């Protein structure tokens, strides 16, 4: 006997039905926003992720050497593949480049609620648009997808921040660029690590860990644009970078203005503690969470303006996000927001062996006219076939009766919801079915 690998899932038909429902809603919303669907390969050269994704994802890679001696990895995220696809055809792609995909990804994480080793993501990204309106459009799409399932601002919110504000904060505190990215990693992990651990890591960077950790906490406690501005003004090196601070504050205010134009302010929570674990983000970053409780993130994204350039292609500003299917499905199930997706069929055909030939001919006719039809493959009595029709949730049952006086070769069609019955000759069967199924 065999069991599924830890962190992987079997999708039985009911699970597939739920997954398909979720994907269909997402695809529809993506198209409403003018995004086109793309896909990429499951297996990629290992360096695509070791160089572009950042340390955390690299430690979670499913990687191996293939038979040709290549170092390869199962994709843990789509963004590096997407940047390659867009970057390598940047000059010939029609702008704006707004693409989405729904794909299966693999990360060797410790399986736990909301986190598996194989999961799906809906990625949506905009390339070539540096304006903050693109960031707002990206956030608006994320919110619309979640709303399309019936979730509201009472259920979830988007925590957002700006990595550029952190760069300014580090600069105003005399921290080098190299140390800044290490400190961002410490901040990203701080909810999973102890205070003592953070202090130790900061000490290792040559800082006074206790004091700097306190400064970080103070900065994160700023919850409005005005509070952030004031904290930056109070930094010891403020006078050396006044224009940078004004620009940072202006960008943040503009994002908020755009969000308000879309009427989405109730969904947004300014939280500088959101810095994102992936290495490539350069500006605004955001994550969607259930508003209450301690569930893992539903989605995450942000601006990454230099990834294509770092990969050797032309520079293309980019912003996007991904929603994971695991936390989203858990949340929708908990809130009863996945509709009843029981299997149903238009017609179930009931016949004795003597009418098999006619029945099979009609099944082919129904199906070729778009009427989904089933029958019992195993020869069995009428009673059992009617039970099978009920189990299949058939909308109508077609019963071959044989000759009835005055209606030769007759067939009884019964609509199941109101028990309406029509007796018809075989040559009128298709029309009868179409009428009863209207
Ligand atoms: P990410 O934050 O690593 O971002 O993942 C986005 C979402 O995917 C998470 O919020 C979570 O819902 C889901 N997810 C991640 N890891 C797992 C896991 N092990 N099990 C289940 N779900 C998981 C990215 O992947 C970026 N590439 C998103 C992006 C697109 N940024 C710009 N464009």
Image (cartoon, rainbow, N blue to C red):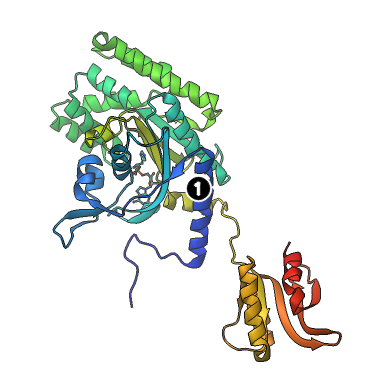
**Where does residue 373 sit, x and y in percent of width and height?**
62, 72
Kindly indicate the quadrant of the structure image that contains residue 322.
Answer: top left
- Spot the residue most to the right: 406
Q: Is residue 199 above or below residue 13?
A: above
For the C terminus, give its image quadrant. Answer: bottom right
Name the quarter showing ligand 1.
top left
Q: Is residue 249 above or below residue 153?
A: above
* 375 vs 360, nearest the viewer: 360
Let me know if residue 64 appears in the view: yes
Q: Read off the residue under disc 1.
A: 27
- Spot the residue most to the top: 239
**Where does residue 380 sit, x and y in percent of width and height?**
62, 89
**What's the residue at 67%, 89% (across, down)?**
352
Q: Is residue 242 above or below residue 150?
A: above
**What's the residue at 42%, 24% (across, down)?**
132
Let me know if residue 209 appears in the view: no
Residue 12 shown left or right of residue 245 in the figure: right
**Where does residue 8 sit, x and y in percent of width and height?**
35, 61
For the residue labelled by badge 1, is the local secondary structure a helix, a strand or a loop? Answer: helix
């Amino acid at each position: 006997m065999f069991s599924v690998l830890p962190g992987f899932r079997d999708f039985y038909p009911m699970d597939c039905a739920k997954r398909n429902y979720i994907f269909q809603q997402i695809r529809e919303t993506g198209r409403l926003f003018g995004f086109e669907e793309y896909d990429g390969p499951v297996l990629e050269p290992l360096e695509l992720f070791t160089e572009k994704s950042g340390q955390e994802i690299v430690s979670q890679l499913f990687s191996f050497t293939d038979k040709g001696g290549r170092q390869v990895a199962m994709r843990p995220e789509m963004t590096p593949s997407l940047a390659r696809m867009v970057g390598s055809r940047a000059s010939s792609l029609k702008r704006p480049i707004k693409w989405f995909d729904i794909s299966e990804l693999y990360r060797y994480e410790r399986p736990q609620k909301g986190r598996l080793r194989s999961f799906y993501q809906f990625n949506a990204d905009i390339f070539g648009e540096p304006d903050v309106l693109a960031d707002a459009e990206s956030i608006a799409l994320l919110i619309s997808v979640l709303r399309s399932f019936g979730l509201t601002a009472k259920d979830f919110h988007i925590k957002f921040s700006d990595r550029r504000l952190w760069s300014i904060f580090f600069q105003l505190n005399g921290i080098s660029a190299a140390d800044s990215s290490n400190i961002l990693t410490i901040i990203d992990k701080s909810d999973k690590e102890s205070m003592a651990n953070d202090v130790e890591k900061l000490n290792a960077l040559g800082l006074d860990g206790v004091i700097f950790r306190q400064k970080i906490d103070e900065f994160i406690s700023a919850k409005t644009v005005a509070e952030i501005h004031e904290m930056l003004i109070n930094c010891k090196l403020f006078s050396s970078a006044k224009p940078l601070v004004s620009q940072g504050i202006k960008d943040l205010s503009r994002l908020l203005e755009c969000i308000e134009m879309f009427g989405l302010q109730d969904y947004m929570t300014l939280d500088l503690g959101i810095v994102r674990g992936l290495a490539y983000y350069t500006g605004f970053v955001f994550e969607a969470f259930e508003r209450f409780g301690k569930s893992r993130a539903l989605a995450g994204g942000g601006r990454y303006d230099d990834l294509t350039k770092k990969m050797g292609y032309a520079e293309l500003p980019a912003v996007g996000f991904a929603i994971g299917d695991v936390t989203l499905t858990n949340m929708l199930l908990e809130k009863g927001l996945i509709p009843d997706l029981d299997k149903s069929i238009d017609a179930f055909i009931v016949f004795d062996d003597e009418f098999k030939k006619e029945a099979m001919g009609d099944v082919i006719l129904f199906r070729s006219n778009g009427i989904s039809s089933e029958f019992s493959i195993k020869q069995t009595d009428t009673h059992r076939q009617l039970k099978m029709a009920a189990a299949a949730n058939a909308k109508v049952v077609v019963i071959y009766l044989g000759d009835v006086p005055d209606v030769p070769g007759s067939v009884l069609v019964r609509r199941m919801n109101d028990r309406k019955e029509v007796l018809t000759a075989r040559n009128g069967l298709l029309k009868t079915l179409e009428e009863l199924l209207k």
